[in-house]
Amino acid sequence: MHNKSVAELSRQLEGGKISSVELTREFLDRIKAEDSQYNSFITITEDQAMADAKAADEQRAAGNASPWTGVPFAHKDIFCTNGVTTTAGSKMLANFVPPYDATVAANFRTAGAVCLGKTNMDEFAMGSSNESSFYGPVTNPWGLSGSGKRVPGGSSGGSAAAVAARLVPAATATDTGGSIRQPAALCGITGLKPTYGRVSRYGMIAFASSLDQGGTMARTAEDNALMLNIMAGFDPKDSTSADRAVPDYTATLNEPLKGLRIGLPKEYFSDQLSPAMEEQVRNAVREYEKLGATVKEVSLPHANLAIAAYYVIAPAEASANLSRFDGVRYGYRCEDPQDLSDLYTRTRAEGFGSEVKRRILVGTYALSAGYFDAYYLKAQKVRRLIQQDFINAFKDVDVLMSPVSPSPAFVQGEKTSDPVTMYLEDIFTIAVNLAGVPAMSVPAGFVDGLPVGLQIIGNYFDEARLLNTAHQFQQVTDWHQKLPQ
Ligand code: GLN
């Protein structure tokens, strides 16, 4: 059962071939038996999951089921879940039990899906390797042995590793600068970052509010479509959510790709990309040509400024968002504070890890009087130019294709001593967030036995086309079906 997709499990439940109680038991047993190797879960909600599975079976018996009724999945531990600890990978929130559901969590609950637990992540979603989590690093199921354990990517490394190891068929994730696409690529699964505003941010612990976007991770594009069907939509509780109709993302998966216009941004096929990685990406593009697509080179002339702009804007917003963790209202509080200043200082010194502190310091500096114009304002201007690059590119093509990351999964500890090396992991993903367009990572081959992802970038609110483009590729290739040993 654990090798089946969400779509297949849903059909089996519908046909009465299996019950949600049996299915949930099987996945929970797998998590308990195997996750010590990966550390992909922070919290396992066994009792609640079994109760939800029983309720789902009753709902199916009563004849009012959704495709998700009784299907197990997991939430990245950044989505608030009513009554279930939500840590964002931080010591600061180790004892935080939200009294409400994020809209995304409520959506899965309403659909009748069964949440098995909360997945590990970089602290406050800051990182590209899942090594900044207070709850320990996650290991990539493709990199358990050999020359050292490998990272699953980050920040949604727990969700990606859990799906790759088939501990859950699907998991939610978030992407501020690459945190869905890069871990999906490194773990050999399929992930989608929707257009900014497509999925509500209500109850999703904030990192950089103008960039944060919730999205999907599963083994197939079809399953990502099933997830987005219940996650997307306007939410009056999130003023940045888009008030637009939500199509049925599964309805267009089978459209033929003949005539699809693909653009290859020349800046993304640069020296930073290893020749072996480039070969896999180019092979994937050739598959699309066989399906009737046309390919041309395009340019995103400001792409090389994306990392610099992001590492001003994201820390600036983070420094504001994280000021709420002060030891007064909720979350961690230091022992025996002497006075208010001591309370703030020690709570934040003890509660945050070093990468989070680095971002708060950088962001506070960039926003301070005298530096605001030189850094924050300048970065916002660069952001506008990057946005315009994408608008221009989409005048001539339907989708852009590129690598997701410059190299496959690296060994744990390899990049932790130099933050800039770590930041460069997102060199091909970050511009997408600054522009706000949607993008996917689709399994497209292997280098040295490790998965490689193809990035497919779409125009604003063109998720249906992205999913169609990815699904058609998965009908003629089997990279997404390869399993780690
Ligand atoms: N790796 C990037 C960062 O550390 C992106 C993280 C994310 O998308 N949440 O900021």
Image (cartoon, rainbow, N blue to C red):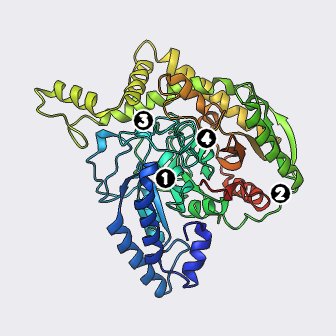
Residue 394 placement (x, y as % from top left)? 77, 41
Q: Earlier in the sequence, mark 1 or mark 2?
A: 1
Q: Which mark is residue 132?
A: 3
Query: In the picture, residue 266 is in which quadrant?
Result: top right
Numbered disc in front, either 4 or 2: 2
Q: Tell me, yes or no, whether the two marked residues, 4 and 2, touch with CB atoms within 8 Å.
A: no
Horizontal relation, residue 138 to residue 81: left or right: right
Dot 3 falls on a residue whose secondary structure is: loop
* Structural distance between the alpha carbons of marks 1 and 2: 30 Å
Disc 2 designates what residue?
257
Numbered disc in front, either 3 or 2: 3
* Structural distance between the alpha carbons of marks 3 and 2: 41 Å
Q: Earlier in the sequence, mark 3 or mark 1?
A: 3
Query: In the picture, residue 431 is in which quadrant?
Result: top right
Q: Which mark is residue 200?
A: 1
Dot 4 falls on a residue whose secondary structure is: loop
